[in-house]
Image (tube, rainbow, N blue to C red):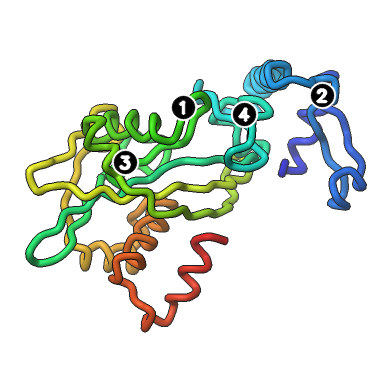
Amino acid sequence: CVRADLVDPLSALGDVFEAVSAESVDGSGGGIALAARFTTPDQRSRALAFALDRLLAAGVLKKLRREAYPVLTRWGAEPLATIDRGAVPLFGLKSFGLHVNGYVRRADGLHLWVGKRAMDRGIAPGQYDNLVAGGQPAGLTLAENLVKEAAEEAGLDAATALTARPVGHIAYRMDNHIGLKDDTLFCFDLELGEGIVPRNTDGEVERFELWPVARVLESVRDTDDWKFNVNLVVIDFLIRHGIIGPDHPEYLALGQGLRR
């Protein structure tokens, strides 16, 4: 899904992109596509990198992240190409990531580790975050990425990180200032002992706090203090652990909406 105002800048890139008819995009009114002469993942990746450099120079794209993401039609498919992470929403591409709910069982109930994002972050500065979260780059398995992100974001060793339990996924689409975010997040629960205190190592989080789930529920319900997708992951956690139960008037709407 490409914004209409991007068609002209892409068309100006010589023979990298070509117009497509309404019939070839299922009647959606036509659009633009990578030229058919790029037939291999490597060719497509180089063509996209060329286009992004030109869009960056023209000011259409503000910055690149210098991290390669796979271009996928669905999870588990062979990548059609790779593209810079910063340009994924520009083309409305499917994106995947992982989020880890770190929690502790105490005599007075569940407590959730909450990260306070650093104020210098380009995305959601100062807002609350999960214990561990990150996008899924090209070239790593989900388990490898889990280990990497857990070390960078919470100072956890690989053995601890790999005890995280996969508990499903959430999905959402949202417009942002670049384009369309079409994201699927794989959710994990990681139970930690009271002696394990997370420590951020990559500068993304300024501190971690251990909150009782009642405080978490109240904050997610009543404030906008959480990063835009973390609140979804936390709501899913609260549903699965019975903190938000079926008697809640929005129980069904929340459950359905998280996987729409």
User: In whole angstroms, how far apart are the C-alphas of marks 3 and 2?
Assistant: 41 Å
Residue under circle 1? 140
Residue under circle 2? 12
As rendered, which of 21 and 103 lies closer to the eye? Answer: 103
Residue at left 83%, top 40%? 31
Q: Nearer the viewer, mark 4 or mark 3?
A: 3
Q: Are marks 1 and 2 in contact (CB under 8 Å)?
A: no
Q: Nearer the viewer, mark 1 or mark 4?
A: 1
The answer to which image quadrant residue 243 occupies is bottom left
Q: Is residue 129 above or below residue 241?
A: above
**Label 2 environment density (alpha carbons within 10 Å; few <14, some 14–19, many ≥20):** few
Q: Identify the mark nearer the N-term, 1 or 4.
A: 4
Q: Which kind of residue does numbered mark 1 sit on?
A: Leu
Residue under circle 3? 132
Q: Identify the mark nearer the N-term, 1 or 2.
A: 2
- Residue 246, given in percent of the width and then of the height, sits at 38, 79
Q: Which kind of residue does numbered mark 2 sit on?
A: Ala
Residue 61's disc number:
4
Determine the secondary structure under disc 4: loop
Instruction: For the C terminus, give its image quadrant.
Output: bottom right
User: In whole angstroms, how far apart are the C-alphas of marks 3 and 1?
Assistant: 17 Å
Determine the secondary structure under disc 1: loop
Q: Is residue 79 above or below residue 240?
A: above
The answer to which image quadrant residue 21 occupies is top right
Q: Which kind of residue does numbered mark 4 sit on?
A: Leu
Q: Nearer the viewer, mark 3 or mark 2?
A: 3
